[in-house]
Amino acid sequence: MKSLPTALLPLVFALGCPAPPPDRPVDAGELEPETGPDGSLIRRWDLDGDGKANIWRVFQGETQIRTDLDLNGDGKADTRRHLDERGEVKKEEADLDFDSKVDIVASFEGGKKVQELAFLHHRATADVVRLFVDGKLAEKRRDMDGDGVYDVFEYFDSGRLVRLGRDTTGDGQPDEFDERPEAEAVPDEEKG
């Protein structure tokens, strides 16, 4: 995986910044706005001085609905943050290895993360599913052999792994459990 150039780190922080109103005067680094195919207003910023946009903020009327960031300077969005009508995040997508394929999709409700899907090998189903309760990790499901069926189930309490389940029959449901799984937890990257 390519590393994120230090000069582009300000882009990452721009996601959390409040959106400027769509009719505000152009800032230094701001490029001419565009109109999207659906009639949306797309405001663009060039943060590294190469003449190409690194940040796109998309508006429907006065409401910002999305922020896109190009983290590696290839002119393509590497992260997308979708907003609801109140300006709260409802979905985030990220291309972590800059191959133009979404690697992570996170869903939010009421400003809190409820689900995160990791497509580590770009299959039809997520390799890893993380489920959150009140914004805290509660469960993780992993497809270790790439057959589209989850094999490992991890259950968390207050951020601590408390139970590990395994599907040994191939039905996608855990049928063996370990109540003391700390020593057996396997990082997501170690896929068998």
Image (cartoon, rainbow, N blue to C red):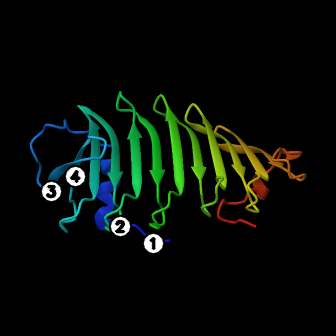
Helix, strand or loop for disc 4: strand
Mark 2 is on which residue type? Asn
Q: Percent position (x, y) of residue 120?
A: 60, 61
| Disc 4 versus disc 2: nearer the observer | 4
Mark-to-mark CA distance, 4 and 2: 16 Å
Q: Earlier in the sequence, mark 1 or mark 4?
A: 1
Q: Percent position (x, y) of residue 118?
A: 59, 54
Q: Which residue is mark 4?
A: 44
Q: Earlier in the sequence, mark 3 or mark 4?
A: 3
Mark-to-mark CA distance, 2 and 1: 9 Å
Mark-to-mark CA distance, 1 and 4: 25 Å
- State left or right for residue 96 relative to residue 10: right
Q: Which residue is mark 1?
A: 2
Q: Which mark is residue 170?
A: none
Mark 1 is on which residue type? Lys
Q: Percent position (x, y) of residue 175?
A: 89, 45
Residue found 35% across the figure and 62% down from its top: 76
Quadrant that contains the C terminus: bottom right
Q: Which residue is mark 2?
A: 72
Q: Percent position (x, y) of residue 5?
A: 35, 69
In the rendered view, tell whether residue 12 sits above or below residue 74: above
Mark-to-mark CA distance, 3 and 4: 9 Å
In the rendered view, tell whether residue 114 sits above or below residue 167: above
